Image (cartoon, rainbow, N blue to C red):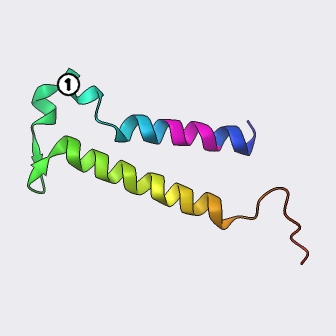
Amino acid sequence: MNQRLRTLLLYALLFLLSVPWYWRLYPELAQRMLLGVPLWVVVSVVGSFCISVQTARVLSRPWPEEDVDS
């Protein structure tokens, strides 16, 4: 699997986990408290943080079209 496809799949997975659409399927789990907030909030914030880290990692590398000799 090439790097671009792997990156796109990772973003798709992170966005699916970060958006709390699936928590309505598990209402008792969604209402559990962690650090003073519902669990779904913690999962969304951690997912958003992971998306930010992934974006920083992707942007820290040179673009494939860039000349790295200069």
Mark 1: which secondary structure? helix
Few, some or many residues within 10 Å of mark 1 (<14, 14–19, 20+) = few
Q: Is residue 9 left or right of residue 68?
A: left
Q: Report the residue that reaches farthest toward the top.
A: 25
Q: Quadrant of the image for the N terminus?
A: top right
Q: Which residue is mark 1?
A: 24
**Residue 63 x/y as whole percent:** 77, 59
**Residue 25 x/y as whole percent:** 22, 21
Q: Is residue 59 left or right of residue 20?
A: right
Look at 15% across and 34% down and name the residue there: 30
> Which SS type dominates the magenta stretch?
helix
Look at 28% across and 35% down and name the residue there: 20
Look at 21% across and 41% down and name the residue there: 40
* Quadrant in the rendering for residue 55: bottom right
**Residue 45 x/y as whole percent:** 30, 52
Q: How many marks?
A: 1
**Residue 24 x/y as whole percent:** 20, 25
* Quadrant in the rendering for residue 28: top left
Amino acid carrying label 1: it is Arg
Q: Is residue 48 left or right of residue 43?
A: right
Chain part drawn in magenta: 7-12
Residue 46 inside the magenta-drawn segment? no
Q: Is residue 57 left or right of residue 50?
A: right
Look at 13% across and 27% down and name the residue there: 27
Q: Quadrant of the image for the C terminus?
A: bottom right
Q: Image height check: is 55 above or below 5?
A: below
Q: Image height check: is 50 above or below 10?
A: below
